Image (cartoon, rainbow, N blue to C red):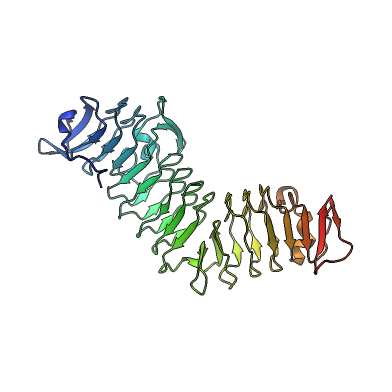
Amino acid sequence: FDFNLDGKDYTDDLTFTANSSGYTVSGLKRPISILRIPATYNNAPVTEIEAEAFADRFSLETVIVPNSVTTIGGGAFNGCPYLKRIQIPFIGGTLSTSTSSSNVFGYIFGTEYYTGGIYVSQNGTTYYIPNISTVILTGPLTVIPNGAFADCRITSITFPNTLKEIGQGAFKNTYLNNITIPEGVTTIGNGAFDSCSQAEYINIPSTVINMDGGFTGCNPSSIKIAIKNNYYTSRNLANVECNAIIAISRKILLKGCKNTIIPDDGSVTSLWNSAFNNCSSLTKITIPSVITSIESGVFARCTSLSSITIPSSVESIKVGAFAGCTSLKEVTIESETVCKKITSWTGSSTTYLLDNATTIKAKYEVVGLTGYTKSTTQQNGYWVYTKN
């Protein structure tokens, strides 16, 4: 893929210096919008791009780096605010699985501030990156290092077919419009796609075998996992799509979305930490009577969720499970355990389940509840508590 280039040879626009393995690109002779670095020069490979070789080139919009290049100097593209698309063989200064500061996307753009540069923090270092929307990776990458693209505004990423692992926080807080993991990837690191709130869908292949907590704060419409994956699924026991990430052997729903249907067939017994966190489009969800535990932050910041029923099977609700659910006005509690303990889960253990509730319906009396008026008799089998 080459961004529909015009096929021109851009060698005459570049300056080169000889190195021990071929040639280094050291600069640009004139303003151009499309920079395609050749793979060879004078019948020798082009292997390096000098540090700051293209610094302050305001005209650059598209850059294509060939797979012959094995080293890109720090800040090679510093001060290029109008750069929108880039094709590179690796991430950072060289092909590596290291998580050092030179193996993140920001390294080739540098730490120097310039007008139009976007502040990002990657592995503890601050960089300023153009508002790049499209990245294509073409080299023999096997690992996307931890934090490699964190805070970038990229909307589209193309992975090489050699990829095996996506590191922790690799795409955290990016603008990806979808998340499609290629076949062959086995590991998705913790927080790899956290806060990618603009991703419309998540697709996971059959090869992924290690994945926990990689999508907190995403708010997709659709979640699909390849049917041949033996470790994770997005379907219930009847093979009906549920729009969720389910760890099969552990029976845990790891990630949900606004269209999730939690299975009621026993394939899920627990909702994982932050499973629906920041799912602002979630307006309603049915928790089936096979769920025994609602973990920390499961529904945190689901600001459109207006009502919830806690089934009789639930024995514990962990800290912050409903934090920030500002529209949660009606709560129904069918669990005797929750009715007895909910008011004791306070301080560092608070669930926030009742914080915004104006009406509480409970199968059993809610022990220690204050600030509400209780009905004198049960109504349709429930005690009704109305906020004073």
Residue 353 screen position, x and y as percent: 71, 54
Residue 312 picture location, percent across and down: 71, 68
Q: Is residue 366 visible?
A: no
Which residue is nearer to you in this view: 322 or 98? Answer: 322
Left or right, 353 with respect to 64, comes to right
Q: Residue furthest bottom?
A: 238
Q: Residue at x 33, y 33 (%)?
A: 83
Residue 100 appears anywhere in the view: yes
Lateral position of residue 82 relative to residue 188, left or right: left
Asked if residue 362 lies left or right of residue 276, the reply is right
- For this orientation, the residue located farthest to the right is 376
Relative to 74, does residue 4 appear above or below in the rendering? below
| 276 or 163, nearer to the observer | 276
Question: Which residue lies at the image location 31% right of the left edge and 44% below the top edge?
Answer: 90
Residue 50 lies, in percent from the top left, at: 26, 30
Residue at the left extreme?
A: 43
Q: Is residue 236 above or below residue 245?
A: below
Q: Residue at x 28, y 50 (%)?
A: 140
Q: How many marks?
A: 0
Say if 313 sits above or below 104 in the image: below
Please provide percent x and percent y for residue 121: 46, 36
Asked if residue 293 lies left or right of residue 2, the reply is: right
